[in-house]
Amino acid sequence: MSVPVITADELILIRGGRQLCRGCTVTVPATELTVIVGPNGSGKTTLLEALAGLREPAGGGVRQLVDPPFGYLPQRPSFRGGFTVIETLRYYRQFTPRGRGLSPEDVLAKVGLTGRGGDPVDALSGGMTRLFALAVALIGDPAVLLLDEPMSGLDPQMRDAIVGILRAERDRGRAVVMVTHALETISPIADHVVLLGGDSTTRSGPLAQLLEETDTGGLADLYRSVTEWDL
Amino acid sequence: MIRRFSPMLAIAGRELQSVVATPAGWAVIGGTLAAVLLTAVLSAPGGYQATSVDLYVMLELLIPMVGVAIGYRGLLQDRLSGEWSIHRAMGVRPSRYVIGALTGQATVLGLLVGTGTAGAAVLVWIGRTRPLSFLASNPAVADPAPMLWLIGLSVAYGVVIAAVVGLLSVYARGRRSAVLGSVVVVGALIVGLDAVTIATSTPLSVMVLVSPGAAYRTLVLTLGVGLTTGGPVLLALLGWIGWVLIAVALSVRRLQAMV
């Protein structure tokens, strides 16, 4: 496993008065694609927020071993109206350290939104907004990308495009952490898995190792086994 | 040093652009300028001092109304849409975010009130050749200083209001509660606190500390128009500073604790 960029030790996460993660220990390796999977309500988003430094855990701690900016894609992204796509990207680029960051035009090309720079952000469709949110996450050329269901609501072609983008980012040495239910789609490029059980327990490790341990054939099978699994 | 301030400037610039980017924002701009200039037109023949008195009475209510209109959704919108999370993941600190947003909204308020009041001063200047009235025989009438004070104090009052509205925006759960909360709280701040302090015969020194509206009135009448002397100017300024510091500190604390 490559060097870690984020570590979480003995995390206790509580949301809405409910304990979602009890003593979770997670390591996010650099240059790998980590997938957080689990049933609805198991705390995937809450864990991602904690790893991004957006949520204080009730116990344990998160250590970010690289400096921001991190690229973050929220679960239901939307952007302030009255601005165009290119204006919003230029705005977020200002928060990246000098000399870092990608050009808005390059990022739009990367996510397949070339020619949409002049569109108002509030006129984009749901799928386009998600693609644009991925562009915002990429604008600072971050070492770590934390993405909450980046493929939700996208057609198969767009999903494939996102898989290509994430693979390219991973191959460029970026750490990618994502919550997703698109297991069949992401399975071929996933390196590392964090499994959240409904009983607030966690198991994580390299995908190949977990598949071997559970005698399952892929990420989807692994996910299906979660509910039956004594984590 | 510049790098330290650049995130705040970026956020402030975005707040400014947000106002001019929507028809509703232009409606607020037009309405504010129209209200200030109409008041000035009606009172300009009285000279700078009389116009300042007429304007401050109107501005004491107008500034909070405009503050709510442009500020109620700034931080709320970013929080609900997930944009605050994006900012924070990019390393933007809550304090810089709050101060940046406050700077932007206060700048909008300041530009609006400043432009409107400067326009009013021009109207007074244009009307200076009219036959002298009783009031115009007073040397103070020809002195624009009261209006300059009024502009400066109105901008500062706008900062206080923007800070309070920003705080409400951070705590609101949705758009409706943000609007209602802002109207109720700012109304209570301006009218309610005055009413309570008057009803309980609270000394002016305490009144200006707790009520931003009373502080504005005292400062304008004492420093600007010069109709009163010996007003608790320092306490009024301290009251304003206190409101801004408390509102910013609570906003930052709230944002630190939430996604």
Image (spheres, rainbow, N blue to C red):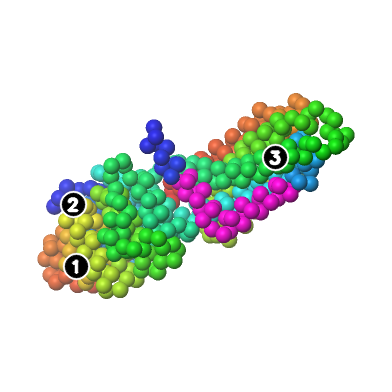
* Percent x, y of residue A91: 40, 50
Q: Secondary structure under badge 3?
A: helix
Disc assigned to residue A173: 2
- Amino acid carrying mark 3 in the image: Val
Q: Secondary structure under badge 1?
A: helix
Front residue of A196 and B174: B174
- Amino acid carrying mark 1 in the image: Ser
Determine crowd level at label 1: few under 14, some 14-19, many 20+ residues with C-alpha closer than 10 A: some
Residue denoted by label 1: A187
Determine crowd level at label 3: few under 14, some 14-19, many 20+ residues with C-alpha closer than 10 A: some
The kind of secondary structure the magenta stretch mainly shows is: helix
Badge 3 sits on which subunit?
Answer: B
* Percent x, y of residue B91: 35, 45
User: Is residue B17 toward the left or the right of residue B200 in the image?
Assistant: left
* Percent x, y of residue A198: 31, 66
Tag nearer the camera, 1 or 3: 3
Tag nearer the camera, 2 or 3: 3
Q: Secondary structure under badge 2?
A: loop
Q: Is residue B251 visible?
A: no
Contact? badges 1 and 3 (CB < 8 Å): no
Front residue of B3 and A42: B3
Residue drawn at (59%, 55%) of the image: B26
Disc assigned to residue B122: 3
For the record, the magenta segment spans B11-39
> Outermost residue toward the front?
B129
